[in-house]
Image (cartoon, grey):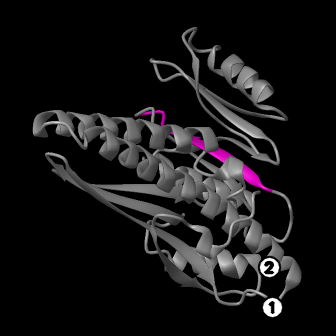
Amino acid sequence: MKFIILMILLSSSSLLSLDEIKNCEFVTYKVTGKTRKEILESMEANTPVVKNFFGQTERTWSYKCNDLTFTCKVTMPEWEDEGLDDKLTEYWEKFYNSLILHEQGHVNITYNEFTRAKQIAKNKSCKEAEKVYSRAVKRINRMQLEHDRITDHGVKQGAVFSGSDSSDLFFAISYSPSTGAYGYAKNYSTKEEAETSAKGYCKETDCIIVAWAKNACVSLATSPKRAYGGAWGTSQKIAEKKALKLCSKYDNECRIATSVCK
């Protein structure tokens, strides 16, 4: 059996350097720019992953009887103009090292769990060993999803890059009244960029912006009957309360679909 899994980090601190990625191959793609805006645009243009995704951990594995092999590759941006501006360099290093921290977490899950599984399966029969590896794969997949959930794909670890020299960050949520699909955007440097991204992730022709915020929270409440309410607030609790109140004007079965905060 052979598998390939990609763990991807959304764009946007414990300091780790490039050579501190352990137990994984490391590759980079070139990024240039002398301002945050130029760097962000360069990352979006040059990333080999998916647009708006700047880091990735790839994992492959195969097993037969007691034999298990697995590989790993982390892809990260490499800023060629680093060091020309002390303030910009400091900002980049915080972002970059947070990406490293997050991706190392993905690497560690696979490496540690497969290392443990190999020890357990070492003296077992072929059938029993494959069961050990199968359980390990399921456990790894659950842990990878949980890692992204807890860290919000690295955002809560500091893996956020703003294209503005301002500390202001914009958030938005879009919603499709016809299908119930929605999209959200976080940590953008302008309201327009956040709204465009949110509509893009919604992926429906009738997606509309239901809430946006600057340095605050946005929430979306929906119901099975496609009632909806979007709102912003200075905290997640306030945003959700307002969204539910708006949605409940049209349906009493409203629930929070998503919330996005700074």
Q: In which quarter of the image is residue 124?
A: top left
Seen in the picture, residue 82 relative to 139 is either above or below; the reply is below
Total residue callouts: 2
**Residue 161 visible from this viewpoint:** no
- Is residue 151 or residue 223 the one in the foreground? 151
User: Is mark 1 in CB contact (under 8 Å) with mark 2?
Assistant: yes
- The secondary element bearing badge 1 is classed as loop
- Please check the rendered image and state whether residue 8 is part of the magenta-colored stretch, yes or no: no
Residue 116 x %, y %: 39, 43
Residue 195 x %, y %: 63, 53
- Is residue 187 or residue 253 the one in the foreground? 187
- Is residue 231 or residue 188 the one in the foreground? 188
**Residue 28 visible from this viewpoint:** yes
Residue 83 x %, y %: 79, 88
Q: Which residue lies furthest to the top in this view?
A: 252
- Please name the predominant secondary structure of the magenta segment in the image: strand
Q: Which mark is residue 89?
A: 2
Q: Give the range drawn in magenta.
A: 169-178
Q: In this image, 119 relative to 42: left or right? A: left
Q: Which of marks 1 and 2 is nearer the N terminus?
A: 1
Q: In this image, 31 relative to 261: left or right? A: left
Q: Residue 84 carries which label?
A: 1
Seen in the picture, residue 206 relative to 19 is either above or below; the reply is above
How far is the residue under mark 1 from the one under mark 2?
7 Å
- Please check the rendered image and state whether residue 170 is part of the magenta-colored stretch, yes or no: yes
Q: Which mark is residue 159?
A: none
- Is residue 29 or residue 52 the one in the foreground? 29
Seen in the picture, residue 48 relative to 201 is either above or below; the reply is below
**Which amino acid lies under the numbered mark 1 shown in the image of this protein?**
Leu
Residue in the image at 81% along x and 91% along y: 84
- The secondary element bearing badge 2 is classed as helix
Q: In which quadrant is the C terminus drawn?
A: top right
